[in-house]
Image (tube, rainbow, N blue to C red):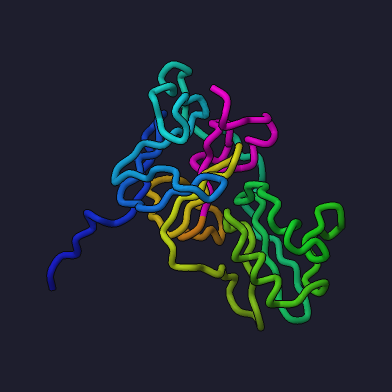
Amino acid sequence: MADTDDSNKPIIEEREDGPLVVKNVAIMRAADGSDAGARPAMALCRCGASKNKPFCDGSHMGIEFKTSPGEPSSRDKLYNYEGAEITVHFNPHLCSHAAKCGAMLKPVFDASADPWINPDAGSATDIKAVVNACPSGALTYSEQGGDPCHIQDGECVIEIEKHGPFHVRNVQLNGGKWATKACPEKYVLCRCGASKNKPFCDGAHADIGWRDDQD
């Protein structure tokens, strides 16, 4: 059997105390859906200080950026919310606080309620759509006692959230400590430099009021 050539495989590699090096990703979109200028090989800023975002300009060296994540801001634990038709699973350690779930299906995903997820307040079809839209993979679902799963599409893409992280689909990540039931085909990567779960986003950009239009 011939060896498999992985030279053209889409991949993201961490550089210690430096940028994310991306290879062979043809599509990178800005927050408004426009082309963000993907290149065959590119270094993306994750210290939050580049003057050429989303690309690295070496600013990480000037601010002595460190990729050591520090103490996690949330527990790596899978919480289960059982409904009659479908069970929703949630790992807060993966959540980037994009809040798409509440925006799409507030009766089911209501952060002001206890418990905050009520699977019986919506249809299984609508809940699956929310799970698919969750950029971080923090939400999964299961039916009839099956394993927690995500819904995936085949697009290989990096999408840039305004004032937020990189949303990545179907790109292999070399690095990082994967949380329980994390999805290697769908995850979010920190851009602000403040996450305690690097290289993954933990919502710190919202806590510190980070903006991608500031130096």
Judged from this view, the residue extending furthest toward the right is: 113
Residue at the (40%, 52%) spot, across then down? 27
Question: How many numbered discs sit on the rendered protein?
Answer: 0
Instruction: Work out which quarter of the rendered image holds the C terminus and state it.
Output: top right
Q: Is residue 109 visible?
A: yes
Q: Is residue 200 visible?
A: no
Viewed as shown, does residue 119 lie left or right of 14? right
Question: In front here: 6 or 40?
Answer: 40
Question: In front here: 22 or 86?
Answer: 22
Magenta-drawn stretch, dominant element (helix, strand or loop): loop
The percent position of residue 181, horizontal first and vertical second, equals 55, 61
Q: Quadrant of residue 119?
A: bottom right
Magenta span = 187-215
Instruction: Work out which quarter of the rendered image holds the N terminus and state it.
Output: bottom left
Residue at the (51%, 60%) spot, across then down? 183
Q: Quadrant of residue 80?
A: bottom right
The percent position of residue 110, horizontal first and vertical second, equals 81, 58
Judged from this view, the residue extending furthest toward the bottom is: 144
**The magenta stretch spans residue 204:** yes
The percent position of residue 73, horizontal first and vertical second, equals 65, 39
Judged from this view, the residue extending furthest toward the top is: 62
Viewed as shown, does residue 106 lie left or right of 10? right
**The magenta stretch spans residue 5:** no
Q: Quadrant of residue 208?
A: top right
